[in-house]
Image (spheres, grey):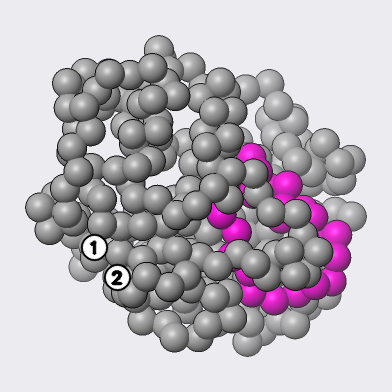
Amino acid sequence: MKIFVTGVGGQLGHDVMNELAKRGYEGVGSDIAPAYSGVQDGTAVTTMPYVQLDITDEDAVRKVLNEVHPDAIVHCAAWTAVDLAEDPDKKAKVHAINVDGTQYIANMAKELDAKMVYLSTDYVFNGQGTEPWEPDCRDYQPLNVYGQTKLEGELAVSRTLTKYFIVRIAWVFGKNGHNFIKTMLKVGKTHPSVRVVNDQVGTPTYTFDLARLLIDMLETDRYGYYHATNEGGYISWYDFTKEIYRQAGYKTEVIPVTTAEYGLSKAARPFNSRLDKKKLVENGFKPLPTWQDALARYLKEIDIDEL
């Protein structure tokens, strides 16, 4: 099976390429940079085939995918800067990447009869209440531009294809790129205390673990909508930070605050990011390990002193 992966310069695309190599699949990576621009960590992603691709260029998408002719596509590329997406002068670009680019990829997946994995987000929901969101729930009410464009990307895939996996994730962290854990470690190293919101609840997702699940999915025809985060229970960002510092051996004080008290974000954030993942087990997929275990493994992977 030949698998084309977009966004390999990001956290998830990096790990997907390495997971493909572990299983002996032929992976072809792509991103907007002329050459692979991610962390040079000696893993397979740095030596596997790479193609420069701007997914907002429909002709380029058609040309590249016709040349590669993959059996499956894992679409990781996206605009993910949530606050920046709210800027009026950025909205057109966000839409071009998250909606138009996804449509172009989906069109080619249909033409090539290729399976497609589309990564989405808890932000497609309104984040109210306390009940976990079901994967097949269609009560969409995105709170911000990012969520709205990711929802439109979902619809582009589901309306174009039948052989698709739409996988919603949340609170993502991986070795290749910036994330909440790295930010908190940097801040905790230089400040005696940090303020972290305690009224937004969800579960982290380690890209190393998620990559395994995505390839598991591609090895089947159990298509549809899924939610995939690490197990280990629902937590707030405050809870997560407390555990990050505990495992890292930091003594930094963590002060819980409400989202209103924190007050720095341009984009509205969902309070309820709980995602129900039982559909994974119902369809024969192995759930991700606990987030506590994922955090422990992640902290061993990164060099805290160099952050």
* Amino acid carrying mark 2 in the image: Asn
Q: Left or right: where does residue 222 sit relative to residue 77? A: right
Where is residue 96 drawn, in percent x and y?
44, 69
Say which residue appears at 68% left-offset and 70% top-offset. 279
**Tag on residue 267?**
1
Question: For the view shown, which residue lies furthest in the top direction?
Answer: 305
Q: Residues within 10 Å of mark 2 (few under 14, many from 20)?
A: many
Residue 177 visible in the displayed image:
yes
Q: Residue at image x 32%, y 66%? A: 270
Identify the magenta region: 206-230
User: In the image, residue 276 lies at what x, y percent?
Assistant: 55, 67
In the depicted structure, whether residue 26 falls above or below residue 139 = above
Quarter assignment of residue 93 = bottom left
In the rendered image, the quadrant that contains the C terminus is top left
Q: Are marks 1 and 2 in contact (CB under 8 Å)?
A: yes
Residue at mark 2:
144
**Spatial CA span between label 1 and label 2:** 6 Å
